[in-house]
Image (tube, helix red, strand yellow):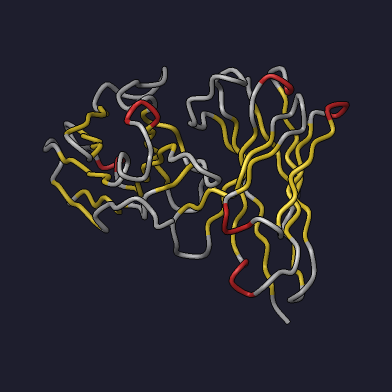
Amino acid sequence: QSALTQPASVSGSPGQSITISCSGTSSDGGSYNFVSWYQQQPGKAPKLMIYGGSKRPSGVSYRFSGSKSGNTASLTISGLQAEDEADYYCCSYVGGSTLALFGGGTKLTVL
Amino acid sequence: QVQLVQSGAEVKKPGASVKVSCKASGYTFSGHYIHWVRQAPGQGLEWMGRINPNSGGTNYAQKFQGRVTMTRDTSISTAYMELSRLRSDDTAVYYCARDPSQIGSSLYYFDSWGQGTLVTVSS
């Protein structure tokens, strides 16, 4: 199975909002309820930002939110800050023998 | 607090096997799935499989079936991932990660990650 589809890169200025899309979560047999998002800083392990499509773990800024439209899940970061610059990955349960798939990753640049 | 500590970096020759460990602390080891995810240099994350630490039951990604074996030792709260018949494109950082949802009602997300283990495959 191919990875879920994410844009390779997005950018925004401090204070702006950006949205990262993740498509293929339904057609691959997955469910929006099982979509999660991870932030990865260079040389670090991924960090959970959103789970269950739109739930935010304790300690994660309210500026991070998850949503869905049709066959596409999205991560929105509002009030961009320099510290948000990182790679972001979506992940979804897809069933079958390969239970979970990650997106290809999106590099966020804060201008 | 939940902590996953992995074994150190490995260098292996093509055709060999590697076994990476992941020691859990701060929670009931048998209560939550442990997943393994890898990341090749400059590439994205790739799900490899998971183990139920209570039963030892496993699920492997189709790509790795026949080459990967995930086990656990509940007496020391440690999970293991062994990958055999290594190739150069298996060079990657291998992570273990915990699914915080209860076994049997997994929500397929990962709230705690190990620090990663670099496996280099080179002749």
Residue B3 higher or lower than B80, as above or below: above
Quarter of the rendering containing residue A75: top left
Q: Is residue A104 left or right of residue A72?
A: right
Residue A86 in picture, x, y percent from top left? 34, 48
Total residue callouts: 0
Residue B41 in picture, x, y percent from top left? 51, 65
Quarter of the rendering containing residue B28: top right
Residue B119 higher or lower than A83, as above or below: below
Q: Is residue A104 left or right of residue B74?
A: left
Q: Which is more toward the observer, A39 or B28?
A: B28
Q: Is residue B58 left or right of residue A68?
A: right
Q: Which is more toward the observer, A17 or B63?
A: B63
Quarter of the rendering containing residue B15: bottom right
Quadrant housing the N terminus of chain A: bottom left
Residue B88 in picture, x, y percent from top left? 63, 75
Residue B66 higher or lower than A58, as above or below: below
Residue at image x 59%, y 71%? Answer: B89
Residue at image x 32%, y 41%? Answer: A25
Q: Which is more toward the observer, B18 or A72?
A: A72
Residue at image x 55%, y 45%? Answer: A97
Farthest residue, direction bottom: B123
Farthest residue, direction right: B75
Residue B58 in picture, x, y percent from top left? 69, 39
Q: Is residue A103 left or right of residue B19?
A: left
